[in-house]
Image (cartoon, helix red, strand yellow):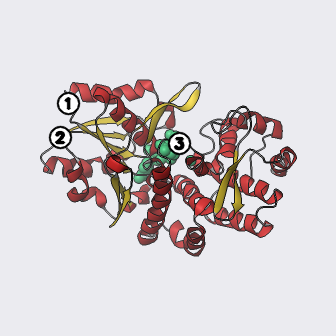
């Protein structure tokens, strides 16, 4: 088992990474302050793993209630958030209750936001069960739900007390979901950690076989990168945290143009990262070989690298609503070199259009 500390002053917390952590009371019980625990999961994950977590909590002498949500991004809304409050109030849980999120990013985001709101804030714990949640959404304290007019528009910053990344639960993850998580893993190498990118190139075959030791290493190095960025910019007040958005401006445009759900987020990000790389090459920042290298590792990870048939006009329209933009100027995360991303609003419009058209054929 590996341990990584997210350094956020009095809100600091550990991330444990390893095999079968779900069964280990010492990773969970010391981080629970009261006697009441609400285990929040969904209809897919609960039948697979909830009983093991429930047992550890109950054996620890805690009162355990459950809230099982329907599975899917479509349910990350007010109505289903209320199911968590219903369960908390029905069980008459106090301000000393702890919420435990067992699931992917959807369950984690909803549980964290519910914890931020319930009686103005109670403790919460993340047990992420997708690769994406283990390397990305469970770290950093962003929580929230969707609004019909915008994704993740209602939320709060809320740090967990502990994160348990159990590599064995990833065995049951569908291949597409697994690859989508790898896109965010590769992202850390591209934006700020060239040695990690090289390590991923050496070990991608083993990672695709979900080798537990390699997975633990990949998760640790991903979380370390995210934790360092978050520690330096917890509330997203400067450009540092924005670097985590490599590929996301292009990716969000793909997701919106194709309709949410047809491309997984990580798939759109993968294609978006390659588009960002293509533009970085047009800006003369990285070489053609660098772009080819990025394409190769994405393909080896089972990720798409060809943009969908979306016109440059439509791309630009969707990209214009990105949260990073300031005063109507498009701001993009590009690669100054391999392993070093920058945020810029100076990308040449003609080159950007060339990148958008390059995907059209
Ligand atoms: P998800 O939570 O929808 O999980 C993907 C699918 O895998 C679901 O069907 C889920 O039930 C299933 N699943 C989960 N664990 C499983 C397991 N071990 N075995 C089998 N099936 C399993 O999606 P996700 O990719 O984990 O997360 C996406 C969400 O995370 C989005 O809502 C996104 O906005 C959010 N997100 C948040 C942050 C953040 O910083 N808070 C960062 C990135 C993404
Ligand atoms: Mg992402």
Q: Residue at x 56, y 59 (%)?
A: 188
- The x and y percentages for residue 4 are 37, 61
Badge 1 crowding class, 10 Å Cα cut-off, few under 14, some 14 to 19, many 20 or more, is some
Label 1 vs 2, first from the N-terminus: 2
Q: Quadrant of residue 79?
A: top left
Q: In the rendered image, which residue does mark 2 sit on?
A: 34
Residue 294, quarter of the rendered image? bottom right
Label disc, if present, on residue 41 of the rendered structure: none
Give the percent coordinates (x, y) of residue 39. Answer: 28, 41
Could you tell me how far apart the alpha carbons at marks 1 and 3 are, in whole angstroms? 31 Å
Mark 1 vs 3, N-terminal side: 1
CB-based contact (under 8 Å), mark 1 and mark 3: no
Q: Is mark 1 within 8 Å of ligand 1?
A: no
What is the secondary structure assignment of the residue under circle 1? Answer: loop
- Mark 2 or 3, which is nearer the eye? 3
Q: For residue 131, say whether it is visible.
A: no
Would you say 31 lies left or right of 254 here? left
Measured Cα–Cα span from mark 1 to mark 2: 9 Å
**Which residue is located at x 24 percent, y 50 percent?**
31
Q: Quadrant of residue 183?
A: bottom right
Which label lies toward us, 1 or 3? 3
Residue behind mark 3: 236
* Residue at the outermost bottom position: 202
Left or right? Give the position of 20 relative to 284.
left
Q: Which residue is mark 1?
A: 94
As rendered, which of 346 and 64 lies closer to the eye?
346
State the quadrant of the N terminus: bottom left
* In-front residue for pair 107/16: 16
354 is higher (above) or lower (below) than 5: above
SS at mark 3? Answer: loop
First in sequence, mark 2 or 3: give its number. 2
How far apart marks 2 and 3 lie (CA) works out to: 31 Å
């Amino acid at each position: 088992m590996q341990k990584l500390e997210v350094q956020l002053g009095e809100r600091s917390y550990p991330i444990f990474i390893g095999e079968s952590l779900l069964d280990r009371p010492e990773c969970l019980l010391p981080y629970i302050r009261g006697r009441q625990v609400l285990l929040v999961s969904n209809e897919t994950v609960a039948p697979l793993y909830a009983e093991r977590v429930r047992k550890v909590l109950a054996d620890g002498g805690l009162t355990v209630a459950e809230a099982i949500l329907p599975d899917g991004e479509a349910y990350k809304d007010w109505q289903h958030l209320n199911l968590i409050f219903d369960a908390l109030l029905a069980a008459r849980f106090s301000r000393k209750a702890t919420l435990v999120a067992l699931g992917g990013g959807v369950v984690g985001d909803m549980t964290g936001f519910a914890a931020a709101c319930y009686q103005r804030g109670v403790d919460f714990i993340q047990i992420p069960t997708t690769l994406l949640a283990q390397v990305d959404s469970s770290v950093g304290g962003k929580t929230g739900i969707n609004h019909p007019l915008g994704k993740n528009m209602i939320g709060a910053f809320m740090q967990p007390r502990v994160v348990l990344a159990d590599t064995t639960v990833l065995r049951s993850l569908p291949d597409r979901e697994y690859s989508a998580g790898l896109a965010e893993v590769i992202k850390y190498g591209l934006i700020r950690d060239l040695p990690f990118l090289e390590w991923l190139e050496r070990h991608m075959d083993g990672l695709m076989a979900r080798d537990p030791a390699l997975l633990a290493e990949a998760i640790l190095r991903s979380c370390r990168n995210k934790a360092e960025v978050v520690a330096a910019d917890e509330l997203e007040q400067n450009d540092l945290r924005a670097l985590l958005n490599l590929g996301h401006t292009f990716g969000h445009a793909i997701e919106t143009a194709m309709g949410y759900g047809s491309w997984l987020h990580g798939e759109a990000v993968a294609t978006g990262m390659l588009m960002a790389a293509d533009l970085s090459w047009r800006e003369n920042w990285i070489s053609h070989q660098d772009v080819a290298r990025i394409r190769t590792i994405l393909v080896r990870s089972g990720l798409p690298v060809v943009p969908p048939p979306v016109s440059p006009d439509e791309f630009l329209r969707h990209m214009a609503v990105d949260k990073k933009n300031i005063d109507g100027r498009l701001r993009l995360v590009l690669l100054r070199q391999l392993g070093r991303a920058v945020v810029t609003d100076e990308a040449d419009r003609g080159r950007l259009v060339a990148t958008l058209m390059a995907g059209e054929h």
